Amino acid sequence: MIYLYVSTFGQDTSWIKAGKKNVCPIEVGACCRKNNESIHYELRDDIGYSISKDNPLWGELSGLYWIWKNVDFNDNDIIGFCHYNKRLDISDQQIEKFFKESKSNSWIVCSPSVAPPHTYPEDMLVLEQILKERFTDYYKSWKKLYHSNGASKDGKHTCSGGELFYTDKTGFEQYCKFLFDVLFEVKDRIGDVEREPYHRRYLAFMGERLLSVFLITNSVNSKHVIIYFNNISFVRKFLRKMSYILGLNRDSKWFIKLRKLLFADKQTSSYLNQ
């Protein structure tokens, strides 16, 4: 069975159901919302084993943690993860075919992009130090992929980020154990931070980079596919695509200039404001 879990903050996810058999929206950061009217789905990350209260630091990863700790999968299940506004552009039939023809230790992830320097490089230094101290093999992979500030080495496409994937039960368990072992240690050392909401999610930004570290360290058989974005205009899709290609983040001066040029006096709810 293929299960696709969709992290959402009360946003509509109905568009994802087209051609998908088992779509499971999960409300992330549920316990941080004062108004329950913003919670539209039964599945939420603040029951059972939960890190929902720290969602401002974790972002969508509070939902991933909840799935890992609270859902029992069968050995033949395929577990997928995506977001309310983006998913991997692949059909259930293609997913089934890939895993049927593949050996174990297989993943479907997004095509790698260029990771820009993290806005707060001191965060990434903590992550790198933890990998060096406790996860030697993963540290070696990190050094092959990224600079100490989290940027891709030599401007190469090294980051299958976004926490968009499909894998089997074994891969899912192995990845989540690695990911949260590392990030809980990071959280213990850095703690909470006083920043604007976007930059407060430092654990989520680390998670995006660590997926590629996990994949190459464990020599997984991976299939790369593009990301499908929902409800984004052609111009916004172009801007996002160019930011991936050029390795720009939302704080880079060229990204800011281009955004102002294209969207002056037209700022609406979109990925640019999240």
Image (cartoon, rainbow, N blue to C red):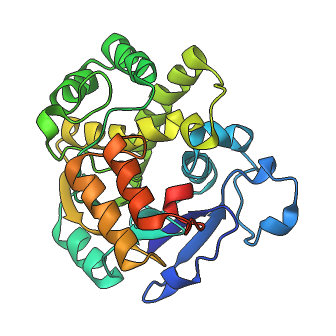
Vertical side of 126 occupied by 204: above or below: below
Quarter occupied by the N terminus? bottom left
Q: Position of residue 262 (x, y in %)?
A: 40, 66
Observer-nearest residue: 264 or 95? Answer: 264
Left/right of residue 209 with respect to residue 181 in the rendered view: left
Q: Determine the residue positioned at 67% across, 27% down.
A: 194
Answer yes or no: is residue 106 visible.
no
Observer-nearest residue: 124 or 30? Answer: 124
Tell me where residue 142 sits by quadrant: top left
Vertical side of 22 occupied by 151: above or below: above
State the count of labels.
0
Left/right of residue 201 with respect to residue 249 in the rendered view: right
In this view, the residue farthest toward the bottom is 19
Quarter occupied by the C terminus? bottom right
Q: Position of residue 267 (x, y in %)?
A: 56, 65
Vertical side of 221 occupied by 134: above or below: above
Q: Position of residue 138 (x, y in %)?
A: 27, 27
Q: Determine the residue positioned at 58% across, 83% down.
A: 14
Tell me where residue 233 sits by quadrant: bottom left
Q: Position of residue 27 (x, y in %)?
A: 68, 61
Q: Determine the residue positioned at 30% across, 84% down.
A: 93
Answer yes or no: is residue 35 visible.
yes
